[in-house]
Amino acid sequence: MEFIFETTYDKEALTVMARALRKTVRKKKSRRSHIFGWIVAALGVFLAIYTHSEISIGMSNFITWFAVAVLIFVLLLEDHINGHYAQKRMLPGTEKAAAVFTEDGYITTTEAGKTEWSYERIGWLAETDDYFVFVFNVSHAQIYDKRNLTGGTADEFRSFIESVTGKTAQRIK
């Protein structure tokens, strides 16, 4: 059996890939960072409201509110921000990839070159409604667009990839 994916590494795909990294291999660290961030944001709001006996628009209060707003913005849009910077760091010619999956391994082809991969290198499998994500480590992953899959269905590919890797695909929202 042979499955073929054609994937465009655009902002949407890279945002999903960042989310998959955060919810798999970075899960504990991300949870600690988010808890810490929300505590700091709450303390910033408390500081801005309760340190002044009257409502003022002084410079220190403005800086506190601005810092809280930036922190909340980053906490809420972390995956989008990471996806944006991943897109900026991509090598030219790697924006589109075609991958052919067989029993022995898979081959990814881009304008920049062709790479043969072994299934043993995949650390975690993640899946969204539109993508499969292979996570290798805390900063490396690959994404495959289900909408551009030929050679079978997404369910058949999930069964195939789970059997050859020995891992279960984690559902990511």
Image (cartoon, grey):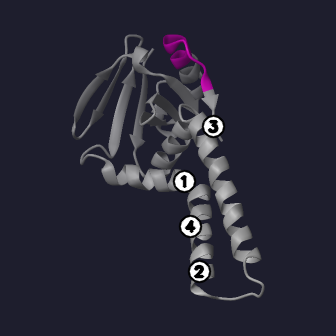
Tag shown at residue 60: 2
Mark whose residue sits in front, 2 or 4: 2
Give the answer, above or below, for where 89 lies relative to 110.
Answer: below
Does 49 sit left or right of 125 as displayed? Answer: right
- Give the residue drawn at x 78%, y 84%: 53
Task: From the top left corner, tell me how far across and down residue 24 is, in percent.
Answer: 57, 32
In front: label 1 or label 2: 2
Q: Is residue 12 or residue 155 the one in the foreground?
A: 12
- Going from N to C along the chain, the mark reached first, 1 or 2, is 2
**How far is disc 2 from disc 3 in space, using C-alphas?**
41 Å
According to the picture, the residue beneath numbered tag 4 turns out to be: 70
Determine the secondary structure under disc 4: helix
Q: Which residues are magenta?
A: 160-169
Rounded to the nearest whole Å, what is the CA distance between mark 2 and mark 4?
15 Å
Res 78 label? 1
Q: Callout 1, which amino acid?
A: Glu
User: Looking at the rendering, which quadrant does residue 50 occupy?
Assistant: bottom right
How would you rate the neighbour count of disc 3 (Cα within 10 Å): few for under 14, some for 14-19, many for 20 or more? some
Q: CA distance from mark 3 to mark 1?
A: 15 Å
Q: Which of the numbered marks, if any, corresponds to residue 172? A: 3
